[in-house]
């Protein structure tokens, strides 16, 4: 069974400096039927104007992934990390027993567009951790590349949950079939472009919940960037 979550059903936030669309309930957007999907709790599609951002704030017991689609994001945290996150980078912060951080647009002239993703951990109150890695274009070209996993396999970032994140960038006209395990849950998020997911049109911002399926068929009509979550 594949169920589409249309981009128009997402909840908006417009703070002037921040424009965001929330796939699941977040902040002032509350939909009791959209509280997440398995351990996947948040997908926020965020756009931040130049030189603005999220002031220092705290998190605990959440796995937080930032995935930049365009622009640069500047990160600082209470663990002493300071970095710039660009397209192709995946950032994973395991908040554990507690961490404070800030995220700002690193550019004074260009918008930064990124996805903020929260996954609930399967173990709590660990020491917080920070991981960041760039995955080159050729590893994502016309295929899904594992970027987050419980064991850090294949050079992916380690997460404290039975969950995987795969990312692919598909050129126009490319067809892909991905084998799935019917006993697991999957969520597809179309980040950019125009695709067909199992005979349903998928545009940027659309999501697809997948249950009891043995394969995923994807056809890209424009250059498209797609995230695939594999969940217990």
Image: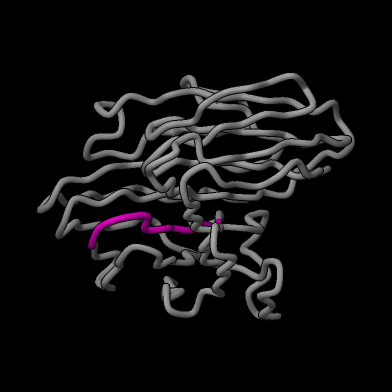
In depth, the one of 151 and 223 nearer the eye is 223
Q: Could you say where residue 61 lies in the image, as x and y percent from the top left?
A: 82, 43
Q: Looking at the image, what colour scheme do you see?
A: one colour
Question: Residue 82's quadrant in the figure?
Answer: top right
Residue at x 44%, y 41% (from the top left corner): 68
What residue span does the magenta drawing correspond to? 185-194
Q: Residue 187 in magenta?
A: yes
27 w.r.t. 184: above or below: below
Q: Is 87 placed left or right of 169 in the picture?
A: right
Q: Is 173 placed left or right of 67 in the picture?
A: left
User: Dividing the image into 4 quarters, which one contains the N terminus?
Assistant: bottom left
Residue at x 26%, y 50% (from the top left corner): 177
144 w.r.t. 13: above or below: above
Residue sitting at the far left: 173
Question: Residue 162's quadrant in the figure?
Answer: top right
Residue at x 69%, y 77% (from the top left corner): 30
Give the mark count. 0
Question: Residue 43's quadrant in the figure?
Answer: bottom right
36 w.r.t. 231: above or below: below
Residue at x 67%, y 54% (from the top left corner): 39
Q: Residue 87 in magenta?
A: no
Q: Main secondary structure of the magenta part?
A: strand
Q: Is 222 placed left or right of 53 in the picture?
A: left
In depth, the one of 82 and 8 nearer the eye is 82
Q: Could you say where residue 225 lies in the image, as x and y percent from the top left?
A: 31, 48
Q: Could you say where residue 135 lies in the image, as x and y percent from the top left?
A: 39, 26
In depth, the one of 13 and 98 nearer the eye is 13
Q: Could you say where residue 101 lies in the image, as x and y percent from the top left?
A: 73, 36
């Amino acid at each position: 069974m594949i169920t589409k979550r249309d981009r128009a059903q997402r909840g908006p936030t417009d703070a002037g400096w921040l424009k965001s669309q929330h796939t699941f309930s977040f902040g002032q957007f509350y939909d009791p039927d959209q509280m997440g999907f398995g351990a996947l709790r948040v997908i926020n599609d965020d756009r931040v104007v130049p030189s603005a951002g999220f002031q220092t704030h705290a998190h605990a017991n959440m796995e937080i992934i930032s995935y930049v689609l365009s622009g640069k994001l500047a990160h600082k945290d209470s663990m002493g990390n300071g970095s710039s996150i660009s397209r192709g980078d995946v950032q994973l912060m395991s908040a554990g027993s507690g961490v404070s951080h800030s995220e700002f647009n690193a550019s004074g002239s260009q918008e930064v567009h990124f996805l903020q993703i929260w996954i609930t951990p399967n173990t709590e109150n660990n020491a917080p951790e920070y991981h960041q890695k760039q995955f080159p274009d050729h590893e994502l070209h016309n295929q899904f590349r594992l970027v987050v996993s419980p064991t850090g396999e294949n050079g992916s970032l380690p997460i404290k949950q039975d969950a995987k994140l795969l990312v692919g960038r598909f050129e126009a006209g490319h067809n892909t079939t991905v084998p799935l395990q019917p006993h697991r849950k999957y969520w597809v998020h179309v980040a950019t472009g125009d695709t067909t997911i199992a005979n349903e049109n998928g545009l940027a911002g659309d999501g697809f919940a997948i249950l009891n399926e043995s394969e995923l068929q994807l056809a890209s009509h424009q250059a498209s960037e797609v995230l695939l979550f594999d969940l217990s």
